[in-house]
Amino acid sequence: MNPAVFLLAAVGAGFGWVAGNVGPGSLAISPTPATRMWSLVAGFSAFTALAVAAALGMSSNLLPLLSAATAMLLLLAVCDAVAGTIPDRLTATTAAVVVLLIAGTATAAPGIGSLRWMVIGAGLYAVLFGGLWFFSDGRLVGGADVRVAPIIGAVAGFAAPSAVTVGLVAAFVSAGLWAITHRAKTVVFVPHLLAGLLVALVVATPLQSFYADPSIGIGL
């Protein structure tokens, strides 16, 4: 296996451990050993997914953006999972980092990424989660989910148009399974949105290749 996979996985584990400490700390909550452990595993898994996506054909020009975005979103996911809320300053910082990195990526590698789909992804996620929050009076999703969802939608759309819908489907499946197994009426969505994004990034290039294959008679 490519050593870069192990390197990214190790980096992810490190970020996960940091998130497991910094996330609860930002909410004045003492991190528990369990929080540190599952955060470490989440970071390891997230960055392994990025490595797999790169191995399957995702452009290496996207890795700086996706690595930084994943690290920041991991911190937000830990906060959401631990307390059901996310400090606004962390959300704003994450949004600023993502916008700057998308702009930098689009400038440095003009043929990589889609600014149009970035806007579509952010708008779709904002409308969907804003609507869920509004019509359920905050019972189905929380305000933190509404604020973070457009950031994830923007990353998904810029990286791969198919990741917008695939990521949403994967997130809702993950959240639904979690709600069923935990008999929960309310779900903190940011961890599931991050998981959905990573699943979508892994399958994005193979999906695009599949639908572009002239032998199956379908073209996108």
Image (tube, rainbow, N blue to C red):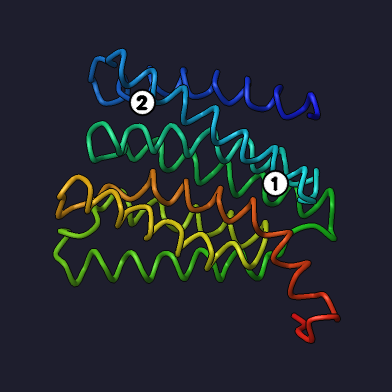
In the displayed structure, 135 sits above or below 156; it is below
In the displayed structure, 119 sits above or below 73; it is below
Residue 77, image quadrant = top left
- Separation of disc 2 and disc 1 at Cα? 27 Å
Quadrant location of the N terminus?
Answer: top right
Which residue does the image show at 26% across and 53% down from the upper left? Answer: 143
**What count of labels does the image hold?**
2
Which residue does the image show at 55% across and 27% down from the upper left? Answer: 44
Q: Residues within 10 Å of mark 2 (few under 14, many from 20)?
A: many
Q: Horizontal and vertical percent for residue 135?
A: 19, 72
Q: Which mark is residue 61?
A: none
Amino acid type at mark 2 = Gly
Q: Residues within 10 Å of mark 1 (few under 14, many from 20)?
A: many
Which residue does the image show at 70% across and 23% down from the upper left? Answer: 6
Q: Horizontal and vertical percent for residue 101?
A: 67, 44
Q: Which mark is residue 23?
A: 2
Which residue does the image show at 37% across and 60% down from the upper left? Answer: 172
Residue position marked by numbered label 1 in the rendering: 53
Secondary element under disc 2, as helix, strand or loop, is helix
In the displayed structure, 65 sits above or below 173; it is above
Q: Horizontal and vertical percent for residue 103?
A: 70, 51
Quadrant location of the C terminus?
Answer: bottom right
